[in-house]
Image (tube, rainbow, N blue to C red):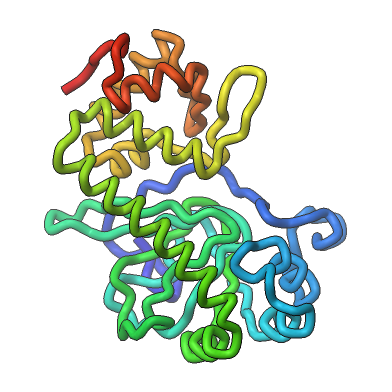
């Protein structure tokens, strides 16, 4: 693990995937590097693409962009730790962030994978004094940060943003409730299938082969999302790969037969049970 200043500290981190520049356009990049520069104009253009801020007027969006502060993270670097003061609300601009909590025996459990365009770590924006979980970069990433009190002022001044945020948080709550129900009542194979289908719904890209997950996914990441062990997740993916349901490469998964995976997730007739 790393402390908030970026230095290593004892603990277990399993980061996955290669660096990504999702959300960037070629016009926003440093000359010769291909990396977004994330100046005020680029931040404003990025905000305009997001449902949460798309209803803002151009002047309001530009004013918000001017207050956002970019921070670059290396893969495996922590943005904040559970229990730290919730001083900022964050918006992921590029890369991938894992929201994690540590169990009593020192193991990390992934609570959520954050994609570019998603707000996270907003506890300070709705009255929380500290972050309830930690955020670690799964890839090299850029986060746009806004002071929590400025975020509260933004919601007060722009009710349309507050309503859009309520819709987004409502969706996250429904997803969390479904995941808790899965963990409490479902067999491990159904949990793994549902975890893959949720990721496909959020990040999937259709191809002539099937649905490619739009983010790197290690076996450990999948195990933690499904509430199972690394060995069980690896064995199940290998079996599905052999049966032609998925193509499970190194930190990349393509769902080749989505309907077959849905049949497993919902225990529909014709689904072949595996696992526990």
Residue plotted at (42% across, 34% down):
197
Q: Looking at the rendering, in which quadrant would you find the C terminus? A: top left
132 on left or right of 166 = left
270 on left or right of 137 = left
Residue plotted at (35% across, 51% down):
175
Q: How many marks?
A: 0
x and y percentages locating residue 162 in the rendered image: 51, 77
Q: Please determine whether, in this image, residue 192 is positioned above or below residue 240.
A: below
Q: Please determine whether, in this image, residue 154 is positioned above or below residue 108.
A: below
x and y percentages locating residue 124 in the rendered image: 39, 82
Q: Looking at the rendering, in which quadrant would you find the N terminus? A: bottom left
Residue plotted at (51% across, 44% down):
202
249 on left or right of 30 = left
x and y percentages locating residue 53 in the rendered image: 64, 71
Quadrant assignment, res 57: bottom right
Q: Please determine whether, in this image, residue 121 is positioned above or below residue 276.
A: below
Front-lying residue, 215 or 107: 215
x and y percentages locating residue 173 in the rendered image: 34, 59
Front-lying residue, 191 or 267: 267
Front-lying residue, 12 or 68: 68
Q: Please determine whether, in this image, residue 220 is positioned above or below residue 112.
A: above
Residue plotted at (48% across, 17% down):
257
Front-lying residue, 259 or 16: 259
């Amino acid at each position: 693990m790393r402390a908030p200043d970026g230095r290593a500290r004892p603990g277990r981190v399993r980061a996955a995937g290669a660096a990504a520049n999702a959300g960037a356009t070629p016009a926003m990049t440093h000359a010769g590097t291909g990396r977004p520069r994330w100046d005020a104009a680029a931040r404003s253009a990025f905000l305009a693409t997001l449902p949460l801020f798309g209803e803002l007027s151009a002047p309001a969006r530009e004013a918000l962009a001017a207050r956002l502060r970019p921070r670059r993270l290396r893969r495996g670097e922590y943005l904040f730790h559970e229990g730290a003061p919730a001083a900022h609300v964050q918006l992921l601009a590029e890369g991938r962030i894992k929201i994690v909590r540590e169990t009593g025996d020192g193991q990390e459990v992934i609570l959520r994978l954050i994609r570019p365009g998603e707000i996270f770590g907003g506890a300070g924006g709705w009255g929380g004094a500290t972050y309830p979980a930690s955020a670690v970069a799964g890839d090299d990433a850029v986060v746009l940060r806004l002071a929590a009190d400025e975020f509260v002022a933004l919601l007060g001044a722009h009710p349309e943003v507050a309503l859009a945020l309520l819709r987004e948080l409502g969706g996250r709550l429904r997803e969390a409730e479904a995941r808790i129900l899965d963990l409490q009542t479902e067999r491990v194979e159904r949990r793994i299938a549902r975890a893959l289908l949720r990721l496909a719904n959020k990040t999937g890209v259709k191809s002539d082969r099937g649905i490619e997950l739009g983010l790197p996914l290690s076996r450990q990441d999948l195990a933690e999302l499904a509430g199972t062990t690394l060995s069980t997740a690896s064995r199940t993916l290998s079996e599905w790969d052999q049966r032609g349901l998925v193509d499970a490469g190194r930190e990349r998964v393509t769902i080749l037969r989505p309907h077959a995976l849905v049949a497993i997730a919902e225990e529909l007739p014709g689904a072949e049970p595996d696992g526990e």
